[in-house]
Image (tube, rainbow, N blue to C red):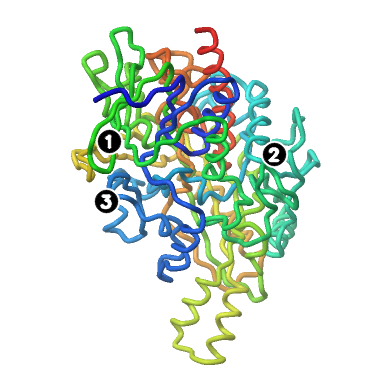
Amino acid sequence: MANDYSADVIVVGTGVIGCIVAEQALDAGLSVLMLEAGPRVERWQIVENYRNVPPRFKQNWNAPYPAKPWAPHIESELPDATTDYLQLEGPNGRAYRQGYVRYAGGATWHWAGICWRLHPDDMRLKSLYGVGRDWAFDYNTLEPYYTRAEYALGVCGPSEVELQWPPLPRSRPYPMGRIPLGPGEQRFTDAAARVGITNLPAPQARNSGVSYDGRPPCCGNNNCFPVCPISAKYDAASALPRIESKGGKILANAVVYRVETDAKQNIQAVHFLNPNKETQRVVGRLFAIACNAIETPKLLLMSKDERNPNGVANHSDQVGRNLMDQPKISAQMLLAEPMWTGVGPVQGSSIMMTGQGAFRSEHAGAMLRCENAALSAIGGQAALAKGLVGKALDAEIRRLSACTARLTIEHEILPDANNRLTLSDKKDWLGLSKPNIYYDVGDYVRRSHQEYTLPLLKKLIAELGAVESTIATTFTNSDHMMGSCIMGTDPTDSVVDVDCRAHDHPNLFLPGGAAMTTGGCGNSTITMAALAMKASDAIVDQLKRG
């Protein structure tokens, strides 16, 4: 086991967090090696995969990303497939069936690109409402890092403060102006206004009418799920060539399975397996584990040794605990008049004001939005089910595609130590433990849905003039993985400090969603990226000081 690989900074994971840490370290003159469990593929291949996906899987964004045996993830909505890798249990296990992919670039391949910041009150739940936890710092501390992250990803957004979220002064404007709403989202905006609710244009990590960072402007393919075919939307895969141009090394198909500590609790190395099941050791001065809120705690728990019998970074017994997402409820509608979703990005606006209020002492806040994805696949399948042929079939496909719409609610959830990832006794192809996840959205979320968000949803459905509607009764995943290596100042009840540095290991950083203390109700990526910026500063400072 020769030490064939080494660098100043070893980054495990090549998603948005890993890319931010790597690039900031490279810009500071440090050497960087990134390791990725899955393959590295070209954009055209994902596009071609999607073209060949059977119609029944067109709405599953993981389908164009077939998993490699050594890097499994969920590929299908079929029950026998979805239970294969993630072992899910608890009252709401289905709501943690996360759709991330283990490819170079991570889940940014098929994210929506939405970049809502947390509201300051989202970071003070305990002090304001007596629930959850408070962050270890306030919004003003995070704001400059939010801005840096927005410029790193290339985020477009409104210039008017009243259309921004939160509606507070910013240290810099968005890098680009906002993308106009499509007709479907505009109709939703007008309906929301009639019931006294404001729908805001969303900040998005995609280019609005101009090129940015070598990426072209968005041309409205409406293909953000499952892949932007032209790279107008930020994805980490488009950042990897830039990292290599700066001297960074990227090693794909390298499944890290062990973090090695020394007698002083410094991290000495990580070990990985390749597709031939051969093992290799990688040494460095500092290590950043940026695999997401499932794979990061799984790796730490697998790395237990004599000094760390509960796993690396886990003297607090909090690794794997406090798993969060935003439990989602969707409604599908058929309208009398065309809604015409599908013009522009798949998501372009959200109602955020419903996430704030004194009610949060009793129940969760929530974000509501109209999905702007084209629903022609749903309309086509519904028309075929009617047994129509010829011109009648064509006309019905057109009608249903134009008049079908979908609304979504995403609820905030409290950090709860019982929502937990542990190691399953079931093994994957490499012989590594699969993740076992217990998940319960809790009465805080259930009360919100019954007393608050469901009535709002029904009001919006009626205001839009729906002639038919179906509201889901089961919470599902939003793919906004948070918690599991929670941040705090007390090493006895948290895993990392304010810079995402592990309390137990001075040269180990766990930046991103796993460190988030609370999640609010908006998409989590830009907060994860802001934490990565903050951690990057600490990483560079620590290594420069020696």
**Neighbour class for label 3 at 10 Å: few (<14), some, many (≥20)?**
some
Disc 1/disc 2 C-alpha distance (Å): 43 Å
Which image quarter is the N terminus in?
Answer: top left
Locate residue 459 relative to residue 157 in the image: left or right: left
What's the residue type where badge 1 is placed? Leu
Locate residue 202 relative to residue 324 in the image: left or right: right
Image vertical order of residue 293 relative to residue 192, above or below: above
Q: Picture coordinates of residue 265 (x, y %)? A: 33, 11
Q: Residue furthest right?
A: 160
What's the residue type where badge 3 is placed? Asp
- Callout in the foreground (2, 3): 3
User: Can you identify the residue that label 1 sits on?
Assistant: 273
Q: Which is more toward the observer, 443 or 408?
A: 408
User: Can you identify the residue that label 2 sits on?
Assistant: 165
Disc 2/disc 3 C-alpha distance (Å): 39 Å
Residue contact between numbered discs 3 and 1, judged by CB atoms under 8 Å: no
User: Can you identify the residue that label 3 sits on?
Assistant: 84
What's the residue type where badge 2 is placed? Trp
